[in-house]
Image (cartoon, rainbow, N blue to C red):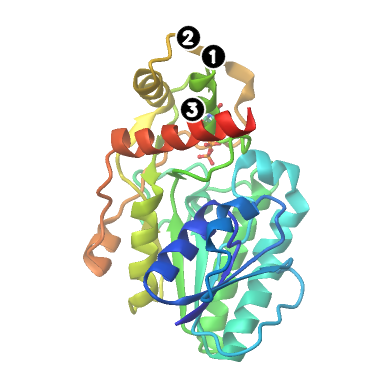
Amino acid sequence: MRILITGGAGFLGSHLCDRFIKEGHSVIAMDNLITGKTRNIEHLAGNDRFLFIKHDVTNYIFVEGKLDAVLHFASPASPIDYLTYPIQTLKVGALGTHKALGLAKEKNARFLLASTSEIYGDPLVHPQEESYWGNVNPIGPRGVYDEAKRFAEAMTMAYQRYHEVDTRIVRIFNTYGPRMRLDDGRVVPNFIGQALRGEALTVYGDGTQTRSFCYVDDLVEGIYRLLLSDEKNPVNIGNPHELNIIQFAETINRLTGNPAGLVFQKNKRIEGDPQTRRPDISKARRILGWEPVVSIQDGLRLTIEYFRHQLAVDG
Ligand code: UDP
């Protein structure tokens, strides 16, 4: 296959580039590099099955030659990033999805949208299954991301129904691993960075809010299977192992041997920060035969090693 991955220099996009190259496919990574980094893909430079194009996909996308699949992963994805780039976040979810779908239609390519658990908002149903419509505040600070992704899902379904584009939608839950940016503000890089510097971990609010963290290799496997499957409706991919933020912080302090403990920052929680989040992955298990296999301890050890190296390089 010849595949275009938008957001190909980002955390998830770059891991997808690696996976598709490893399977023998040709990959074009496209990224405007506002949150993506070329160092995530520099090891692929020189591979004759890999091409990087710097481009903002909210503008018309031109790709020469045939394409078998378009994977639309371009978007700021951490709360700090989408608060820093609120307009770009809305534009890439709306205009960028439209352009990427138009390209898939033109090339007769399969299209896969990176959607998110954020479309469930601060959920009133727990765990979240695909049939749940969500509880989202359109005008809150997270609305720029949540509504852009909800619009992107609607646009994808419209292209499927009215233009008969062959589409897939993955709803991605919290994912972590090497190549997350130390400064993206998310809980995983924040906590590991703090722990490696011997600082107290900053727990926002009272730390009773929950998340369920999926190691990136597991996520990529789920996305790979979904792309090759026949499922045209959204599928949750994530790890159902749920922890509250205090438990998560304690796990990181234990794994890094950080004696500095926790510090509670009551006011740092962003309005609309979901109180609970855990994917119901029955559908992925049934349709894709997929479930995560990497434990939180193993995944965090690999991620800690990566950040230790980054801190040594960048300071
Ligand atoms: N969080 C925290 N300390 C931090 C960063 C985040 O306690 O230094 C909390 C945050 O309030 C949220 C959870 O960790 O409840 C996950 O936040 P993240 O930014 O990773 O992503 P989200 O799942 O909210 O999109």
Instruction: Say which label, 2 or 3, has the lower sequence index.
Output: 3
Distance between mark 2 and mark 1 Cα atoms: 6 Å
- Identified at 53% across, 90% down, the residue is 108
Instruction: Say which label, 1 or 3, has the lower sequence index.
Output: 3
The amino acid type of the residue labelled 1 equals Glu
Mark 1: few, some, or many residues within 10 Å (few <14, many ≥20)? Answer: some
The amino acid type of the residue labelled 3 equals Ile
Q: Nearer the viewer, residue 80 or 268?
A: 80
- Helix, strand or loop under label 3: helix
- Identified at 75% across, 56% down, the residue is 88
Quarter of the figure with the N terminus: bottom left
Residue on which the image places disc 1: 199
Mark 3: few, some, or many residues within 10 Å (few <14, many ≥20)? Answer: many
Residue on which the image places disc 2: 260
Distance between mark 1 and mark 3 Cα atoms: 10 Å
Indicate the position of residue 12 as horizontal and vertical percent values. 50, 55
Left of 232 or right of it: where is 34? right
Indicate the position of residue 193 as horizontal and vertical percent values. 54, 26
